[in-house]
Image (spheres, rainbow, N blue to C red):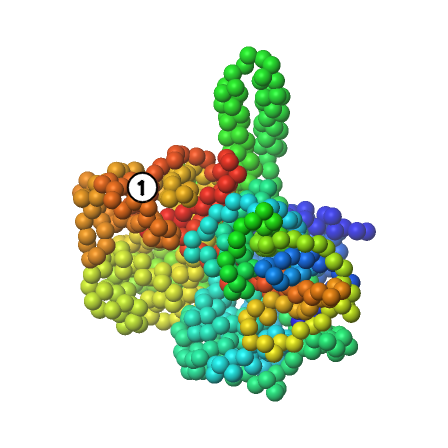
Amino acid sequence: MENNENAQKIELSQFIVVKLGVEQYGINIQYVQNIVRMINITRVPKAPYYIKGVVNLRGDIIPVMSIRLKFDMEEDIQTDSTRIIFVKLEGNEIGLIVDEVKEVIQLSEADIDNISRESHEEKDAYVFGVGKIGESLVTLLNIEELIKVNDPLKV
Amino acid sequence: MDVSQYLEIFIDESKEHLQSLNTCLLALENKPNDKDLINEVFRSAHTLKGMAATMGFKRMNQLTHDMENVLSEIRLGNMSIDPVLLDTMFKCLDALEQYVESIVQTGNEGENEYKAIIEALNAALNGEKKPAEVAVEAEAVLSQDVITGEAVNERKHQTLVFTDFERHAVVQAKKENLKSFGVTIYLSEGCVLKSARAFIIFRTLEKLGSIIKSSPAVQDIEDEKFEYDFSVVVVSSEGEDKFLKELGNIAEVEKVLIDEVDLETAITAPISDEDDQRDEDEEEQKGRTKDSDSKSTNKPVTNRTVRVDIERLDTLMNLVSELIIIKNGLLTVENTNTNFSEQIEYLERITTNLHDAVMKVRMVPIERVFNRFPRLIRDLSRKLNKQMVLHMSGEETELDRTVIDEIGDPLVHLIRNAGDHGLETPDTRVRSGKDATGNVYLKAYQDGNNVVIEVGEDGAGIDVTKVKNKAINSGAISYDQASTMNDQEIIELLFRPSFSTADKISDVSGRGVGLDVVKTKIEALGGDIEVKTTLGKGSTFIIRLPLTLAIIQALMVQLNEEKYAIPLNSIQNIEDVKISDIKYIQGSEVINLRGRVIPIIRLHDKLDLQVADENKTSITVVIVNKGDKLAGFVVDSLIGQQEIVIKTLGKYLTNLKMIAGATILGDGEVALILDVNSLV
């Protein structure tokens, strides 16, 4: 249900294009709060493997997730262009580590192909479509699924 | 006229008036002819009526109006107060509370007219003695409605709407030879702390498989936005029986309905087709109206407020002015000869005072929670046919507002337990040489940095042997385990999930409800609970809660490159221990410190750290306590004592047992705070 609403909202919307390895991914700009250079991350013991730890962002403590680890890619290598993108959804804020932030693009619904869900990889749950800009393709991330809190309840 | 801006004031004042009505009526029960009390009750009811009318709450106005009529007659001496009438009055108050609650939740008073109560009031006016039971009937009818509503399709999971993604997950599971089940779970009505109970159920389900869908949404369940049932879809390798068995073992689960998901008949939400989508939405909305408009209206329309003494605000204001002065002082510190460290000391003094002042603003006397208990005891006493008296003390003890809001339910639970399990029946009491009237004690006081709340009673006390046998019979512990446990450890078994010693189940308590949930709740507030009991003399539950939640004194320690904070109030002392002094008991490390054997906990292992230097001759051990238990944390080095501000790690990292939160250090780095209770 929510997936669908999400899909409707994005007719003509802006995406931030980021790089992970050689692939390009798009993050809907409406979720993005902030983009910062790599800062010191405090490891949190026993956290899920893809949570690198927590950071202090202007006095707030926010967890940081490695998309690479979540996608079963090799570990992040920190470079000058590494960035943390902070996204916020329903009051939950989380940082996502990316190799590089490239540009902001605008896509209309016609530029987006909803991908079929035949594939078996878990990773595909976090993708809702592929955007076309000229010749190159951008995998559009389903932020909602990506940062979903997995623990069913807290007391 | 738009009165919405007065809504908050209305709610606050209504609650105050209802409280005072409750208190006065209770007093009237003992002194039915006290003119002052009757006048007071009349005034409160009158004000309440006026307020409800102004705000346009017609039903509430009607009810208070009828109540006032009766009170007016009593005041004039034309009628006298009798127990039947008082019961009706109490029913009125309950109904009014329902109205107010509904206003808090949705902004309007709801549909219920409580005709039965109004009739009973009018009957009293006409001199008939119509018992208050009528009112009870009305409630019964209501709940019946709910039941017949559910009978239409109790297997609610069959009507769940699947999204493409969830459908995909089911297909995927089938390919991997896993089964998908739709499960609907009904909690027993009257279950307190529903969300905590649901949490336990979710945890059980996750042990058996993975949950791919839940209705209502997980967030809503967490916020207790559900009736007494919820449905989930689970993918698992286990069979139905296993589910029924595991879920059936959880206390307060009334009924579990389970079916394998059949995608052919399952309703799917189409993704691409817009029209269909809209239809679906409408349908869903229709469905939702049954759950009383779950999403939009369930959010409380008012903000949470605290009433603050103006003096406290003045103090705050003064401190802020001082803060500005010190800021100006610091700006000129280079040009003048004033000592920099002097200024810093001054600043430190102000921030400490400021912290105190702000904390005081957040503090509310515990009276707010306590004052509904006399009524609770009265009702309990009626229901259980046991005479009991409540003795309260320390109502003026102050606690943080957030704690006050949360502590009510656990306390209600403990008091019910005290009345139901704790106190014996009057004849048993007389036979064992006690007064027929039982005593329930409720005490609050401050103890250092903690607030202690004690719920006690002079009943039979907990029979350790009985608990032990029960635990062995129910398979909670083995016979061998039982023989090595001391009394205190056995009593602590009571806090395990689904454990009850009551021989028979009453509608007050005894279904294994509670103590585990109470404990979970109190631990979530950063406190702990213990029980002291003497057979034949009664038992006391002792709750300790931290005075402040936001700022604590902590000891900063170093482990490899990482810094951690240990709350100072749980630290006993710090010792340098020679490696050669470490002994082994059953394979675990202990030290003998001044005659006490203390287990050693290697924080490096617990926190997944590499041990840097294996060849040390001595280690630094921080001795911490959890209640009476001691344990020693091994750390690399000590950094020092510091005042830290506690921040949460956010939703993504809530299930981490060992970490209580995080704090930001002077250099902007984040340090984690260790949760001593779960590490020991």
Q: Could you say whether the residue bearing mark 1 is in a helix, strand or loop?
A: strand
What percent of the width, then of the height, locates residue A24? 65, 61
Relative height, residue B181 to residue B479 (above, below): below
Relative height, residue B464 to residue B247 (above, below): above
Image quadrant assignment for residue B274: bottom right
| Closer to the camera in the image, B485 or B464 | B485
Position of B566 compared to A53: left or right?
left
Q: Chain of mark 1?
A: B
Position of A31 compared to B337: left or right?
right
What percent of the width, then of the height, locates residue B48? 67, 51
What percent of the width, then of the height, locates residue B71? 63, 54
Q: Amino acid at mark 1?
A: Val
Residue shown at the point (72%, 48%) measured from the top left: B6
User: Is there any visible trace of residue B72 in the rendered image?
Assistant: no
Q: How many marks?
A: 1
Relative height, residue B370 to residue B178 (above, below): above
Residue shown at the point (39%, 60%) measured from the top left: B515
| Closer to the camera in the image, B421 or A89 | A89
| Closer to the camera in the image, B192 or B455 | B192
Position of B467 compared to B644: left or right?
left
Relative height, residue B191 to residue B45 (above, below): below
| Closer to the camera in the image, A122 or B236 | A122
Residue shown at the point (51%, 16%) measured from the top left: B339
Task: Looking at this view, name the residue that lies furthest to the right.
Answer: B1
User: Is there any visible trace of residue B617 in the rendered image?
Assistant: yes
Task: Looking at this view, name the residue that lies furthest to the bottom.
Answer: B264
Residue shown at the point (68%, 46%) measured from the top left: B9
Task: Looking at this view, name the residue that lies furthest to the top.
Answer: B337
Which residue has dot 1 on it?
B622
What percent of the width, then of the height, locates residue B414? 41, 57
Position of B270 compared to B395: left or right?
right
Crowd class of label 1 (few under 14; some 14 to 19; many from 20; radius 10 Å): many
